[in-house]
Amino acid sequence: MLPRFCFLRSVASLTMRAFSRGPVSLQGKAPDMSEGNTHLLVSNVRNRLREIVGASTNWRDHQQALADRLSLSNQLAGSQDELPVRRMKDSYIEVHLPLGTDPTLREKYLNYHKGVRFGRILEDLDSLAVLICYSHTHNKELQRSPLSIVTALVDKIDMRKQVIHPDCDIKFTGHVTWVGKTSIEAKMHMSQYHDGAYTPVLDATFVMVARDPENKRAAFVNPLKPEGPEEEELFQQGEINKTRRIELSTASLLKVAPTAEERKIVHSLFLNTLDTKTVSFRSRVLPPNSVWMEDAKVKGLEICHPQERNIFNRIFGGFLMRKAYELGWANACAYGGCRPNLIAVDDILFQKPVEIGSLLLLSSQVCYTEGNYIQVRVHTEVLDPLTRHHNTTNVFHFTFVTDKDVPNIVPQSYGESMLYLDGKRHFNQTLESQ
């Protein structure tokens, strides 16, 4: 049985030991912040990113600023060897969210259940990951960075605590832990000040990619040199993560057939739904305490306004994650008949950017259940109203837990059976990572 919440993995504890800063707050209040990258308020992160790339908060000026970035292409490195080596500590950032001292800010994060809106936390994590990567690639000789750094993948978010207090300060810390030629892995940790001390809330791993000023082709990033055995282990874990992602992609059910064991599971599900009174393959009966997969969907639509743009004039990835999470949570809530708690997020893939003005279609599906756990997949796509073409932009996977056992989800078609197996795989990966 999966534990009530996900415990910190050994690699995350290594990060905390390597970069521990000790207590930084008293009486639940945020400490004084400097204006540099090392210590920031969450409200300053997006502003700092705009400064780095030369973006504007004004819509009209913002478009012109992006056009001006085209001239920065000649500042890109021709190879990774041309760039100076960085250390992990060079990208270390500490960001504070003063919910305990800022009532106005608290309103933005407060949910109906007197907790914290986790979708807002996802937005903050996405912005922080980008800033961490810009800190790694910072060149003090340049006024603006020629790199366009965007989120490629949310590899994993593990919850270490289910209750996030809306009136206590939150601290985010993070740094780069692995670097390829054009991609960067950033690990982040979130803790909250409560009862006189900071306690861990979650650990997150994001994979970012660097592109040219037009965001059209890959760009080289600074190499990373681990210092000491702990950093070496963190870097090696990054290599392992990369290999694992390649293996999972190769074994995707969209590319290859299910394993022999998985085929037996699908056939067993099929046999359990046959009507014993007939000999027809088409006559299906829903088993007791079960729900057809077709009846466990919740859909939504978003019109992508300029307000939700990122620093590169596309829709902010954190906004997409928030909307997908909230839809997935609502589906899990309706399915289980009670308030669910998130225990893990994994394998959020950003396939295509979402342009401003797009019609964004979101579809959440309960795809696997086990005991009191619910696995939800959220698929997002943009619709071109003129051509009627649909293009997938993101796929999200969320694992929820409830206070009571939930009905079994049952697929009918072959496609639904593949969704079921994919959900089971993601659930098992969450279990194995503990």
Image (tube, rainbow, N blue to C red):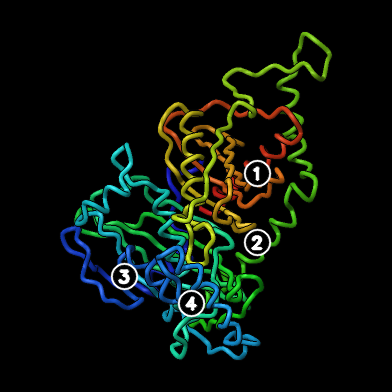
Give yes or no for contact between labels 2 and 4 (Cβ–Cβ under 8 Å): no
Q: Secondary structure at mark 2?
A: helix
Q: Which residue, given by chain and number where applicable, does mark 4 sit on?
A: 231
Q: Nearer the viewer, mark 2 or mark 3?
A: 3
Judging from the image, what secondary structure is the residue with disc 4 in? helix
Crowding near the residue tagged with mark 4, few <14, some 14–19, many ≥20 C-alpha atoms within 10 Å: many
Q: Nearer the viewer, mark 3 or mark 4?
A: 3
Mark 4: amino acid: Glu
Q: Which residue has dot 3 on it?
A: 40
Q: Nearer the viewer, mark 1 or mark 3?
A: 1
> Residue type at mark 2?
Arg
> Does label 2 or label 4 sit earlier along the sequence?
4
Name the spot of residue 21 as percent of width and height, x first.
30, 73
| Other residues around mark 2 within 10 Å, as few (<14) / some (14–19) / many (≥20) | few
The local crowd at label 1, few if under 14, some if 14 to 19, many if 20 or more residues have their Cα within 10 Å, is few
Camera-side residue of 193 and 41: 41
Residue 314 horizontal/vertical position (percent): 54, 60
> Which residue does the numbered mark 2 point to in the structure image?
244
Q: Quadrant of residue 403?
A: top left
Q: Residue at point 56% right, 83% down? A: 72
Of the image marks 3 and 4, the number of the one nearer the N terminus: 3
Residue behind mark 1: 385
Position above or below: 264 against 98? above
Mark 3 touching mark 4, by CB under 8 A?
Answer: no
- Residue 228 shows in this picture: no
Q: Report the residue at 30% width, 58% height from top.
A: 170
The kind of residue tagged 1 is Pro
Q: CA distance from mark 1 to mark 2?
A: 38 Å
Q: Are marks 1 and 2 in contact (CB under 8 Å)?
A: no
